[in-house]
Image (cartoon, grey):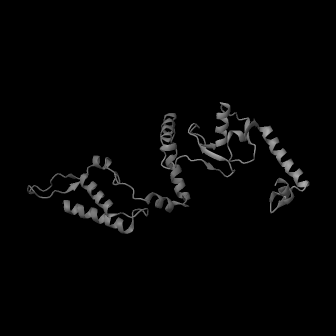
Amino acid sequence: MLIRRLNEILKKHRLETEYGHSGYYMAKPRIILHRVRQEIQNLTPACPSDSKEREGEDIEMIPTGEQVRKRIPWNKGLKMSPGYGEARAHSFKGRRHTEATKMKIAEANRGHIVTDEMREKMKQKAQERVGDKSSNWKGGKAKINTRGYTIEYDNSLPLGQYSRYRPRYRRVMEQKIGRKLLKSEAVHHINGVKSDDVPENLYLCNLSSHRRLHNEMSQMIMELYRKGLVIFNEGRYNFSQRLLEQMV
């Protein structure tokens, strides 16, 4: 009977509400109601086995094989509650697959060949989720990396790059000279401030000349130190008091 079938569905989802589904989430009342509706839609009337069954009586509903294969997922159309994605990601943080799980994954992937057509499809799908199309897009604002250089997002870089952020001084120099920088070329900051990327502070040179410039700067500091114009204090070089008085 239809009522008996509905009671079985409610009993099943009542257990999921109490103990959770596979330990990953706790079912909510609206999810249970959605599942019950899906179950009702996927049910079809069975052939009456009782010849005495009268018209108007409830007929037991059972799913057919075709409906089982084409069953609509219970969560289709449901929106994720605010903060659910972050909470679930935090719950999985630090977890690692066991050796048994790794063996199962390896066995499932054994013999699976990725064709060139599949690679092209995956590449196209990845291109649809980069830059401002990504869910993690924050505007591509310029920021300072760990080396002190200002980096910014560059959409012209190829997709295979580790990151599409690159130093801003390279873009400024390329605009200044009207062409792309070569791999053998370097950009030197004249005043030594790595985040100062104005064209007047940038000098184009090759790699060996760039190293020579930094070596000359170090030698000049050593010469000033020997003359007492620069002092070394607490791991840093600073101007001496005598040099500061002369500068004033």
Q: Residue furthest bottom?
A: 18
- Residue 16 lies, with reference to residue 46, above or below; the image says below
Residue 146 appears at what percent x and percent y? 67, 52
- Residue 240 lies, with reference to residue 128, above or below; the image says below
Q: Residue at x 49, y 48 (%)?
A: 108
Quadrant in which the C terminus is drawn: bottom right
Q: Is residue 117 left or right of residue 202?
A: left
Q: Residue furthest right?
A: 227
Q: Residue furthest top?
A: 178
Q: Is residue 117 left or right of residue 240?
A: left
Q: Quadrant of residue 234?
A: bottom right
Q: Is residue 81 left or right of residue 48?
A: right
Of the pair 206 and 87, the residue shown nearer to us: 206
Q: Is residue 198 visible?
A: yes
Disc count in the image? Answer: 0
Q: Residue at x 81, y 57 (%)?
A: 238
Q: Residue at x 84, y 60 (%)?
A: 241
Q: Is residue 130 visible?
A: no
Of the pair 95 and 84, the residue shown nearer to us: 84
Residue 226 appears at what percent x and percent y? 91, 54
Of the pair 135 and 196, the residue shown nearer to us: 196
Q: Quadrant of residue 230?
A: bottom right
Residue 113 appears at what percent x and percent y? 51, 39
- Residue 19 lies, with reference to residue 115, above or below; the image says below
Q: Residue at x 51, y 61 (%)?
A: 90
Q: Residue furthest front?
A: 248
Quadrant in which the N terminus is drawn: bottom left
Residue 100 appears at what percent x and percent y? 53, 58
